Image (spheres, helix red, strand yellow):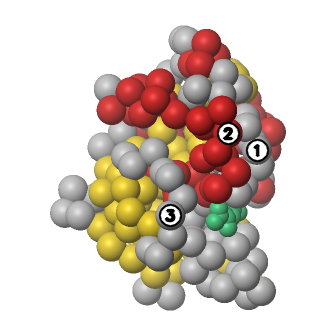
Amino acid sequence: MLTIGILALQGAFIEHSMPIERLGHLSKEIKQPKDLEGIDGIILPGGESTTISRLLDSTGLRVPIQNLLTAGLPCMGTCAGMILLAKSIEADSVPTLGMMNIEVKRNAYGRQLGSFTRMEVVEKISDAPIPLVFIRAPYVIKVAETVEVLHRVDQHIVAVKEQNLLALAFHPELTDDLTFHKYFIEMIQQN
Ligand code: GLN
């Protein structure tokens, strides 16, 4: 049984514990540096990336998380979590963790039209169509050669993987579908 940390500073963090537990693993809320002890992977949830970024500093979590990710701890970032993983954000100054060689556009679908659900077959991960829920979502506008593109919606890159890091523009934790959490667990087990 694995212990998966979920960054619990702001946003949709509670929702990630359900899929982790349905897959038979333990979830652990991360609110301060000592909570990072003993985790096998970490999830950065959706929310407001500027708020989460500010709280990363006030809690002292920014540097310990950066160190763990650099050392190879598997991480899945969803929506705002994707923004936090990126090295570069287009036309925006939110301080990220700067871990993945991607450039991300925040609120890429606009603020009004920003929320929608698409049923998509994510060929690299699943044969069946799965619901992808976008909420004021970002997408990836540039990737380095080291980044594997897992999925595009309407030509826009919405799921990427680079070594121990997985970033999704959408919210798998807001659906009943376990595909992406299962994929993340397998990433940890193969680590
Ligand atoms: N729009 C948010 C941001 O820029 C992300 C939205 C989300 O996580 N659902 O941080």
Q: Name the image quarter holding the C terminus.
A: top left
Cβ at disc 2 under 8 Å from ligand 1: no
Q: Secondary structure at mark 3?
A: loop
115 above or below 56? below
Residue 23, x across and y down, in percent = 66, 33
Specify which label sits upstream in the sequence, 1 or 3: 1
Specify which label sits upstream in the sequence, 2 or 1: 1
Q: Secondary structure at mark 2?
A: helix
Q: Secondary structure at mark 1?
A: loop
> Which residue is at the far left?
145
| Mark number displayed over residue 10 | 1
What residue is rendered at 37% in x and 46% in y? 99
Q: Amino acid at mark 2?
A: Leu
Task: Give the number of the mark in front: 2 or 1.
Answer: 2
Depth check, front residue: 140 or 64: 64
Specify which label sits upstream in the sequence, 3 or 2: 2
Q: Amino acid at mark 3?
A: Ser
Depth check, front residue: 71 or 67: 67
Identify residue for label 2: 55
191 with respect to 80 (left or right)? left
The quadrant in which residue 4 appears is top right
Circle 3 crowding by C-alpha within 10 Å: few under 14, some 14–19, many from 20: few
**Do the residues bearing badges 2 and 1 touch, measured as CB atoms within 8 Å?**
yes
93 with respect to 52 (left or right)? left
Quadrant holding ligand 1? bottom right
**Do the residues bearing badges 3 and 2 touch, measured as CB atoms within 8 Å?**
no
**Do the residues bearing badges 1 and 3 touch, measured as CB atoms within 8 Å?**
no
Give the alpha-carbon distance from disc 2 to disc 1, as whole Å: 8 Å
Identify residue for label 3: 93
| Mark number displayed over residue 161 | none
Q: Name the image quarter holding the N terminus.
A: top right
Cβ at disc 1 under 8 Å from ligand 1: no
